[in-house]
Amino acid sequence: MLGMVLAAGAGRRLRPYTDTLPKALVPVDGETTILDIALRNLAAVELREVVVIVGYRAEAVHERKAALEERHGVRLTLVHNDKAEEWNNAYSLWCARDYFGQGALLVNGDTVHPVSVERTLLAAPETSDILLAVDDVKTLADEEMKVTLNGGDLARITKLMDPAQAYGEYIGATLIRPGAADRLADALRATFERDPQLYYEDGYQEMVARGERIHVAPIGKVDWVEVDNHDDLAKARAIAGTYL
């Protein structure tokens, strides 16, 4: 199984940092970046072969590749998204489709969370080929990527949902088992061909619409944050240093 980090986004709401850096390289704990935390977590669960999808300011990741590999004891494969500044991340994840067959633990390159999330996903029973890490504790608002369940199966995943109806928030970490590879790639392709501005989570919804079973793994009470703006960045800086 591989680690996988989706790190192609521009993060315009984090300027001036993202004038020259992709969002994943914004520092959150001294010189430690969001990408550093992701790689550290993956290495801690022995996922040392890591695919990183790059796009916006990809040269900054290329320049740091050797240092990141040495620091975290990983080997990085950089996959380039040629439409990172034009299309949304359904296409971005599809760019890494050739690696799905090895199995992957995917984390978003703008999410700061502790390694307990990766451990929760890897320890879960193999009840579905795709398993989503979900925060079922947090009080939700309009911006979150919310989920509802039908029994134990994913029913809906979207930001466009009344928070009161949601089971919880998908936190940007997915276990992709090898058996899902072709079906996930096809669903992602159908998603961005329908609308290139859709999210990869819309690809999961496409799979559900096709009759696929996707399960969730509750992460419990965990300090984490999706870093979209400067307020989120301040929260990330408050919690990143507390991770072991």
Image (cartoon, grey):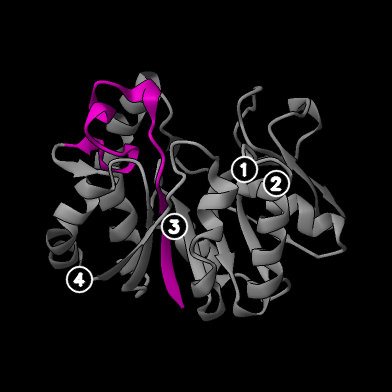
Residue under numbered circle 4 = 73
Residue at disc 4, secondary structure: loop
Q: Which residues are magenta?
A: 1-29
User: Is residue 220 in sight in this rendering?
Assistant: no
Q: Is the residue under label 1 in contact with that under label 4 (CB below 8 Å)?
A: no
Labels 2 and 4 touching (C-beta < 8 A): no
Alpha carbon of mark 2 to alpha carbon of mark 3: how far? 26 Å
- The label number, if any, that marks residue 199 in the structure image: 1
Q: Which residue is more in the foreground, 153 or 193?
A: 193
Precedes in sequence: disc 3 or disc 1:
3
Q: Nearer the viewer, mark 3 or mark 1?
A: 1
The answer to if 233 sits in the magenta stretch is no
Going by the numbered disc 3, the residue's amino acid type is: Ser
Percent x, y of residue 8: 40, 46
User: Can residue 156 be seen in the rendering of this structure?
Assistant: yes
Q: List the residue tagged with mark 3.
A: 116
Q: Is residue 53 left or right of residue 237?
A: right
The tag on residue 243 is none
Which mark is first along the chain, 3 or 2?
3
Residue 120 horizontal side relative to residue 27, left or right: right
